[in-house]
Amino acid sequence: MKKWLTHTSLFIIPIMVVLMCAELFYRSVPNNYTYKHEQISNKMDDVEILVLGDSHTFYGINPEWLSLKTYNLSNVSQTIYFDSMLFYKHIDHLPSLKYLIISVEYTTLSQVDNTQEDIWRKYFYEAQMGLKVPLIDWYDPKKYSLALTRKFDKTFKTFFDYQEEGTLIGCDERGWGNTYQSTVDSLEMAYLSKVVARKHEDGSMDFNQNTERIQKMITFCEQRDIQVLLVNMPVYPDYLNHLNPEKLIKIDKTCDYLTKTNSNVTRVDLSSDFRFQLQDFYDADHLNAQGAKKCSLLINDYLNFY
């Protein structure tokens, strides 16, 4: 029995040590979640434009190039589910807000809750952005330990990234993701377009739940005299060509419907805008810094016209 306990301890103790180190790492090292939470929770009385969305707006809309004071609250793989939760959490602390930018991309309207994109991120939204996430049960051990939310190889990679870069924060003081600086050649882009389009296809045409979430935010904004921009961000043409045309038509009709039935909504469709060329893209569906500047200036023109 004593020998068994010794062997068991030799097996369990290293695992516990690794878990404790991982927990300390996640709880103490600032990242996009903690940084954005701190930013949006403090000294935002003068923010006039709030940007929501996933990685397309995170990397693609740079507040530096907008005339009004802007904060980009979007994040990688952030769904409308979390967009809406963040919106309602912080709207009362943004007294100067005039415009809300909501990104509508190929995955936005059909994304269901608690799928692969949310499987670990939801715990970070709750623990590090102060959200009460209904998807998380009170008895879920991951609710109390971020170290349990990700596989060890992902945690180790994140740790080594931190060691190499010296930070896990991938955005500037206005929330813009400033790490996508480069581009790829046309042959690689053609390959990436096909791969990414296949990855983004969830096979769903059910937009009801997420359309309702967007409509509720629009209605709330109308009551506060806040204008809403529905933005379809630029993507590389090859990527667009690999997407389901029937779904693209339905997305287009849904955005048009929201625009026509709400007096405070304007649609800005840049998804196939010819002004964006290869050199503006980091990959098949994300702009680089140069493209983000171009996109932000175009949105600024819409705001000025509006």
Image: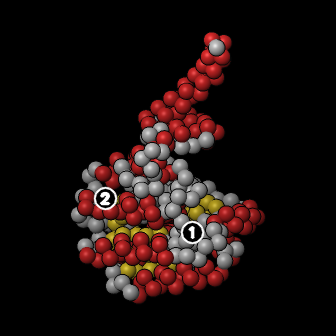
The residue carrying mark 1 is 107
Q: Is mark 2 on a helix, strand or loop?
A: helix
Q: What element carries label 1?
A: loop
Q: Residue 39: percent from the left, percent from the top?
A: 34, 50
Q: In the picture, residue 257 is in which quadrant?
A: bottom left
Specify the color scheme.
secondary structure
The N terminus: image quadrant: top right
Q: Earlier in the sequence, mark 1 or mark 2?
A: 2
Q: In this view, does 131 lie above or below 196?
A: above
The answer, for residue 189, to whether it is visible in the render is: no
The C terminus: image quadrant: bottom left
Q: Which amino acid type is marked by label 1?
A: Thr
Instruction: For marks 1 and 2, give the CA distance.
Output: 25 Å
Neighbourhood count class around disc 1 (C-alpha, 10 Å): few under 14, some 14–19, many 20 upward: some
Q: Which amino acid type is marked by label 2?
A: His
Q: Residue 64: percent from the left, percent from the top?
A: 40, 60
The residue carrying mark 2 is 90
Neighbourhood count class around disc 2 (C-alpha, 10 Å): few under 14, some 14–19, many 20 upward: few
